[in-house]
Image (cartoon, grey):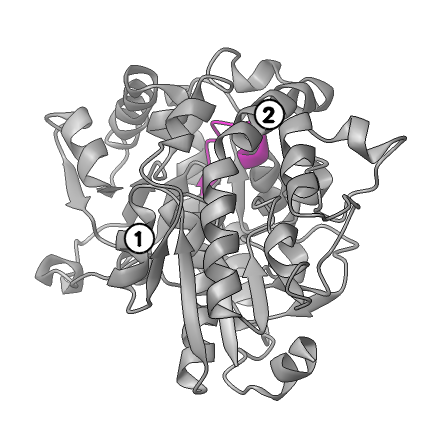
Amino acid sequence: MRVLFIPYFIPSHYLHQAATAWAFRAAGHEVRVAAGQPGVADAVTRSGMVAVPVGGDYDLLARMATATQEQPVEQQAPGEFRRRNAEALKEYAEAVTAIADDLVAFAGAWRPDLVVADPMVTFAPVVSEPLGVPLVRHLFGPDLIRKLGFPASGAPVDGDIREAWPAPLVGIYDRYGVEPRPDFAVRTVDSCPAVLQLPGVPNRLPMRYVPYNGPGVTPGWLREDPGRPRVCVTWGTVNTTLRGAEDAQGQLRGVLEALTALDVDVVAALSASDRELLGEPPAGVRVAEQLPLHLLLPGCDAILHHGGGGAMLTAAALGVPQVVCAQSTDQALNGEHIAAAGIGLALPPREPDAAAVKSAMARVLTEDTARTAAARLRGTPRPWTPGGSSGWARTAG
């Protein structure tokens, strides 16, 4: 069987699909991964998969950032977020035309038997439908994309769907003779624990979350006992772009300085670009550049992060209590789920307050609630990981 994966155009989104792609590959199937933006192809090939470059070097993330930087997250009510999200979707739909053209051409030549796509890839049906092959949605955490009403995400549409969707996206569908409808996916692969997931995931196929945050080497210091609690801080891979370098790095430095006031060993897990922007770290902070979370977190007592799906699910799988300092509305929703599950605390989504950061981390480290809940979630039996092919073969018909 030939399986085509289409991640969203950010390397971190591909990482959620990597374990599934490898399950197919290990079962003897052919796998290709569409790499539609700078950096994605590198993430794909570094994981051992075959990348298919599509759409050239157009930087979609940088273009979409202009639609998300203008208003502080704490001022974005759900309705306002949907309006601003619609602006970003319009920018996205205008930008993906070249990507869609390349991807449809590749799929027509390679002839996949199954297409597995990120829910943010709203044009995925124009790849699968003309070929008459099943489309499977692959979530990257709670099903927020459906909650926020993205096209083709399974979210209900009020009124005329052609009026509700961004016109450029409707144009892409029309070009390939695919009539828009609320949902095209026959199954939804969901590796998010039920306690963190939204209800009503359509055609849900539960799967074990396998932590993978990229390749790396375990440093020697990580095997040493620091003699006090070790706290990981990570700010995600796209916040700097979406929030602006000065804003994002100022917030990161504030968080690090707040944590150094506690008797903890602070480790900042940063990308190479964020490490450069941070400059000289606050005294007492160790910077772990390009060290994947799945290698770092087993040696940590807690993590403070931005509320991204990768950090949330990796920490949950490894039983590490969490403190969330969200930088966008979707990240704030993840923080609410973490707090509701009892596996951590969520700070108000705004400029991090030093006193609030210290208080939340102190509670997570000293109180039993989050630590016990995180350990319980880690020990909860998980669904199987699809290493075999029989169930997927039935999906592919």
**SS of the residue at dot 2?**
helix
- Left or right of 297 on screen, residue 122: right
The kind of residue on which mark 1 rests is: Ala
Give the image location of residue 104, x and y in percent: 53, 53
Please name whichever residue, 212 or 13, is drawn nearer the observer in this view of the structure: 13
Vertical position of residue 245 compared to residue 347: above or below: above
**Residues in magenta?**
323-331
Residue that sits furthest to the right in the current view: 159
Magenta-span inclusion, residue 330: yes
Q: Residues within 10 Å of mark 1 (few under 14, many from 20)?
A: many
**SS of the residue at dot 1?**
helix
Residue at the spot x=61%, y=36% of the render?
333
Q: Quadrant of the C terminus?
A: bottom right
Residue at the spot x=83%, y=41% of the render?
156
The kind of residue on which mark 2 rests is: Lys
Q: Which residue is under mark 2?
A: 90
- What is the number of the mark on residue 41? 1
Q: In the picture, residue 21 is in which quadrant?
A: bottom left
Give the image location of residue 212, x and y in percent: 36, 62
Residue at the spot x=28%, y=34% of the render?
262
Residue that sits furthest to the top in the current view: 70
